[in-house]
Amino acid sequence: MADIIKLLPDAVANQIAAGEVIQRPASVVKELLENAVDAGGDYIQLIVKDAGRTLIQVIDNGKGMSFNDARLCFERHATSKLRAADELYHITTKGFRGEALASIASIAHVELKTKQPDETMGTLVQIEGAEVKKHEYCTTQDGTSISVKNLFFNVPARRNFLKSDNVEMTHVEEEFFRVALIHYDLSFTLFHNGKQIYQLPAANFKQRIIGIFGNGFRDKLYPVEQETDIMDVHGFIAKPENAKKKKSEQYMFINHRYVRHPLLNYAVEQAYAQLIPQGYRPAYFIYIDINPECVDINVSPTKVEVKLQDDKLLFGFILAAVKKSLGKMSLSPQIDFDVDPIFEQMPQKPADRPIVLPTIEHNPNYNPFDTVPQYRGQTQRDSKPYQWNERLNPDSWNAFLEGLKTEHIAHQEPEQLEATLMVETPSSISIEADVPNDFPYFVVDNRYLFLQLNNRSMVMDIVSARERILFDRNMKALRDTPIRVQQSLFPVTVTLTPAQGDLAETLKKELLLLGYDIEKIDMTHFAVNGTPNDEEAEGDLQNIISNMLDDYKSNLFLHRSDNYQNIALCMAKQYRSRYAPLTSRESVTELVRQLFQCDCPTVSPSQQKTVFILEPQFIESLF
Ligand code: ADP
Ligand code: MG
């Protein structure tokens, strides 16, 4: 029988490759923008018509191409960025596969005009479905302009697969953001159907974020900054109260390349655990600089997925860096950012370079809490009982109001949203940084507190609010201000299961910091010699202690890994529902004050909302 295997013609091979790399107009945008960045200029224009169906044009003022290169760049595996396989791990350019232009040219009408700055003449190349129609000298400006017209003209299946212009344009913009965000030192413009949509002058990272996502972001971000010998992390994260229920702006870059890596995303979200309600997502803009040898970018044709040599290390590093930022900004009291062991676990540098231990700069005197820390070695007896600050934490209060704004505008269209943000700049709302003494309120069912503060009507879930207050208090007790123990004249004996007893022994020290002085009698019996110096602890010690221990244990299985957080939360849960009826104005004011002294007052540590704003629209919807 005759041989039947044949090599595919280039045009067919390119179309097949295009199937992988070019899925929609946005894929062309990505490839052309990346080439423009690689070309080394400082101004890049993206011009799009009909969401890229009819035209995608990218103009740069970079190094341009020679007459021959202008033709050769459309060949498969034609690249100036890579010569040998081992260079793959030192790549600093966006491209290296030499596939994009060949793929694009096989499924569209392409016109290239390019000129190297030191040449007098430029080059024009026209290609239609891989067939070269023109290749000649022309006059044109320095740099490169590539127009891609009639995308998928010869691939009807792909063309029919495209979504509405709105959807396709969203994808186009997304690719534009990904490149423009991390290359903030270059200027970018985006035109759609003759209208300029974005004009982004060269800027710093934060200015670029604001340039893209609007002025509303100005006050919503905390910086993240962590430099070590092995890798650097920079960027911004959203304040917890600005987390959103729907998709948030989440951007991670490694070595100037946008990447999607579920584990690293999880690291960021994990740092927010207990600061934002379940299902809410923080915005973040983080870039990591790391030795390129530690990252394999060649795992997918679009290079968005990456493989990391040591993803656990990177995970820990990002988690710690984000936690540190949240902690430093006083929003996350449960985090001991100064002693995070991850920074000490950084691997050593490759042998050919001198080994320098990673260092972290921090201010040893910095203290995110208001009170002077006391050391745990101190006995609880000579320490002061826990006391609430007299004054409201103005940051919490402002953050709370900020949160209101976000919530209020969450359902609005982008244009409306922009308008709201413009009008409601923080300075236009005048806020007293203290809870007034005479706000109107009433209590329903001894569970829900309706109140009006600064002309806002709200309802507070007393139980969730108390959980937040107690959790913060417990964290503080565990860290630096132990709760005073009230010694009992007649110690109570509690009966535990052997497993509970074992755990009680282990947690003896922490329980003491929380005001419980327990002493083992035998495997299953413990004497409680002292209890916290507050009324709520009276009574049901047996249940409080055994439930708390059970809860603690089941959280261990749920990987609630921070020991202090776990204890603080479990104990808070024992107490959140034990409160005297709120019959006096003082008790109500005290509760409201205590809540707003917390650093994250709107969400309980079990991630329930503590306060709900009664917007007029909401009330209207009830009728
Ligand atoms: P890759 O970017 O992976 O090298 P491409 O198909 O995207 O592959 O581009 C092929 C080659 O064409 C590049 O390596 C580069 O030399 C050249 N090239 C593409 N776009 C530009 C541009 N805007 N300016 C200068 N050279 C370019
Ligand atoms: Mg390329």
Image: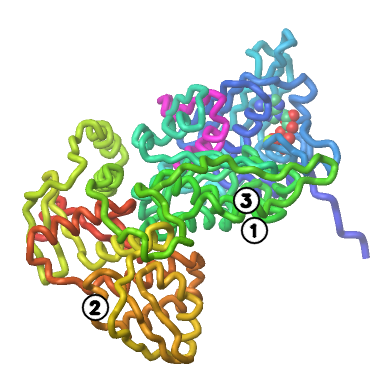
Q: Vertically, is 500 above or below 342? A: below
**Residue 617, visible in the rendered structure:** yes
Q: Vertically, is 571 above or below 170? A: below
Give the mark, 1 or 3, whose residue is nearer the N terminus: 1
Specify whether 517 is left or right of 41: left
Query: Label 3: which residue?
Result: 343
Answer yes or no: do the residues labelled 1 and 2 have beta carbons within 8 Å? no
Query: Label 1: which residue?
Result: 312
Label annotation for residue 95: none
The quadrant of the picture showing ligand 2 is top right
* Along the line of sight, the residue nearer the viewer: 601 or 361: 361
Q: How many marks?
A: 3
Give the mark, 1 or 2, whose residue is nearer the N terminus: 1
Answer yes or no: do the residues labelled 2 and 3 have beta carbons within 8 Å? no
User: How far separated are the C-alphas under marks 2 and 3?
Assistant: 43 Å
Query: Label 2: which residue?
Result: 538
Residue 279 drawn in magenta? no
Specify whether 299 is left or right of 505: right
- Residue 568: x %, y % from top left: 39, 67
Which callout, 2 or 3, points to the residue nearer the camera?
2
- Residue 555: x %, y % from top left: 45, 74
Residue at image coords 63%, 28% = 36
